[in-house]
Image: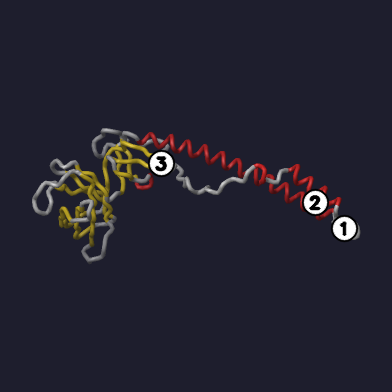
Amino acid sequence: MIGGLENVSMYDPTANLNKAPEASDELGQDSFLKLLVAQMQHQDPLNPQGNEEFIAQLAQFTSLEQLMGVNTALGDLYAATTSMNNASMTQLLGRDVTAFSDQVPYDGDGPTDLHYQAASDVDRMTITVLDSDGKVVAREELNGIPAGEGSWRWDGKDIHGAQAPEGTYTVSINAADELGNPVTVSSLLKGTVNEMSYATGAPIPFVDGIEISIAEILRVETGGSKEGDEA
């Protein structure tokens, strides 16, 4: 596995969209003290403000000033973390990964393996391959599938026996146990991370041209490794 990638902190680049106030709009320390002096000069001499009230106002200002300092520090930390995360994600480039995805690429040449992961033992399972228009291209019924990862070799032919063209296909899987209860079986994508996009502010890897999220990556292996040889 790649060191430091397993526990990469996730972040939302849109979490801090509120515009920071302009410097001229902020109540600084000098402005606050001027307000206090003006308040003392214009207070009612028959009903003067007590020292306790001034002390309370000063305490509130001190707390606000400290919170503003914390907010600035957190902003700097956020920027540094974002930069580190973006840099660390580049380590995925050229790596072989296994990720959850119902989208799979097909080069239009011969058979290809479609991978899946079953949450528990499966009695009956149907794998359906759909094209970009949602039309059924191929379908296979499988029986006696054990829990864990597995694969089905699609011959690349459609339901009419014709060669399917190159493109991105959708894999739909329905499964049930021996009692007829549904079993979760997830489609897996195995391939190489050949692109990393930062268009949205967050790193988005592409596996053989198919977009996935960092959270969908199940396993990372060294580039060009054989299946099962983990980094």
Where residue 170 appears, x then y in whole percent?
A: 24, 51
Q: Quadrant of residue 122?
A: bottom left
Q: Say which quadrant the C terminus sits in.
A: top left
Name the foreground residue: 12 vs 40: 40
Disc 2 to disc 3, C-alpha distance:
50 Å
Does residue 104 appear left or right of residue 27 in this picture? left
Q: Residue at label 3?
A: 199
Dot label at residue 44: 1
Helix, strand or loop under label 2: helix
Q: Is residue 173 above or below residue 166?
A: below
How many residues crowd around disc 2 within 10 Å: few (fewer than 14), some, or many (20 or more)?
few
Disc 3 to disc 1, C-alpha distance:
60 Å
Dot label at residue 55: 2
Residue at 25% across, 49% down: 149
Helix, strand or loop under label 3: loop
Where residue 20 appears, x then y in whole percent?
A: 59, 45
Residue at 28% across, 53% down: 186
Where residue 35 appears, x then y in whole percent?
A: 78, 48
